[in-house]
Image: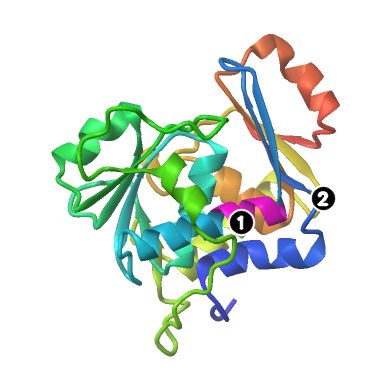
């Protein structure tokens, strides 16, 4: 791989959307709430586009900016990161000095304590209910993101910068894609596979905290992800059968 012809999100989603955009790409379970949400490649891309439009139009996020993603392993977290990368910005585990912080209610104080210029708070509610009582100036993702378009046209990057763009904790796009491809090969993932995991692959644990090994490896391989949160171990084997899982990434 010598470089990128487009930005990082295009590299991850482009092959998936070209091959089978209607097929399930992310199936999310939360055993604490009883949620099961399934997103096709098209649906995830639409959410990423809405997020990118929100970040660029309301948060003034620009290429090269830094975004703290203080969120758990969740389908909305994946949409946020893809939106950040579509804007040409970097996802960071350390919120110090970032341009934008995206957080859930549990980490709102962290985002406020580091005085991020822009804070976007996510309720992660399955029905799109926002967070009540947010401090003035904090953007409520659930209520604002729905107002934005389902398509996103990235700003044209400067010549020869796509491959060198820093996308994740100081690592450039080519490095992260190479790591994701290696992780997919190590796990034996290929096109059409279904990978189940209970890992909390949040960026809070840094570049090697599971983010590359789970969602990015799955996307890079052209596989689909079955993400289980607050899991009841008693149901995992049955769920793996129901979802036609081919790989377990725990």
Residue 144 lies, in percent from the top left, at: 42, 48
Q: Nearer the viewer, residue 150 or 162?
A: 150
Whether pointer 1 and pointer 2 mark residues with C-beta atoms closer than 8 Å, the reply is: no
Query: Residue 62 appears at what percent x and percent y?
Result: 33, 70
Does residue 42 show up magenta in the picture? Answer: yes
| Left or right: 154, with 1 as reference point | left
Question: Residue 161 at x, y = what percent?
Answer: 41, 82
Relative height, residue 169 to residue 164 (above, below):
above
Identify the residue at image location x=42%, y=57%: 54
Cα distance in 3D space between marks 1 and 2 = 21 Å
Residue 59 visible, this angle: yes
In this rendered view, identify the residue nearer to me: 165 or 9: 9
Residue 27 in the image, given as x and y percentages of width and height: 69, 36
Of label 1 and label 2, which has the lower sequence position? 1
- Residue 183 appears in the picture as rendered: no
Q: Give the magenta-colored segment's residue range.
A: 41-47
Q: What element carries label 2?
A: loop
Say whether residue 48 is left or right of residue 225.
left
Question: Which numbered tag is attached to residue 192?
Answer: 2
Among the 4 quarters of the image, the one containing residue 158: bottom left
Vertical placement of residue 89 versus 208, above or below: below
| Residue that protrudes farthest toward the top in the picture | 234
What residue did someone put label 1 on? 46
Secondary structure mostly taken by the magenta-highlighted segment of the chain: helix
- Marks 1, 2: nearer the viewer: 1
Which residue corresponds to the image point at 55% horizontal and 77% vertical from the top-left?
6
Classed neighbour count for the residue bearing mark 1: other residues with Cα under 10 Å, few (<14), some (14–19), many (≥20): some
Q: Report the residue at 77% width, 68% height from top.
A: 18
């Amino acid at each position: 791989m010598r470089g990128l012809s487009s930005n990082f999100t295009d590299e991850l989603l482009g092959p998936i959307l070209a091959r089978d955009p209607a097929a399930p790409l992310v199936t999310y379970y939360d055993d604490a709430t009883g949620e099961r949400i399934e997103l096709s490649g098209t649906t995830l891309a639409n959410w990423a586009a809405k997020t990118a439009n929100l970040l660029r139009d309301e948060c003034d996020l620009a290429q090269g900016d830094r975004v703290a993603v203080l969120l758990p392993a969740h389908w909305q977290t994946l949409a946020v990161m893809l939106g950040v990368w579509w804007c040409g910005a970097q996802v960071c585990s350390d919120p110090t000095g970032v341009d934008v912080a995206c957080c859930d209610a549990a980490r709102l104080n962290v985002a406020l304590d580091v005085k991020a210029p822009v804070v976007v708070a996510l309720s992660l509610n399955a029905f799109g209910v926002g967070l009540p009582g947010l401090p003035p100036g904090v953007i409520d993702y659930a209520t604002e993101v729905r107002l934005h378009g389902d398509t996103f046209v990235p700003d044209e990057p400067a010549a020869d910068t796509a491959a060198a763009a820093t996308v994740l904790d100081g690592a450039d796009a080519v490095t992260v894609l190479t790591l994701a491809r290696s992780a997919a090969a190590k796990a034996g993932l290929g096109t059409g596979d279904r990978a189940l995991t209970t890992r909390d692959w949040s960026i809070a644990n840094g570049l090697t905290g599971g983010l590359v090994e789970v969602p990015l490896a799955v996307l890079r391989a052209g596989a689909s992800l079955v993400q289980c949160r607050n899991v009841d171990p008693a149901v995992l084997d049955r769920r793996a059968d129901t979802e036609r899982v081919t790989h377990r990434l725990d």
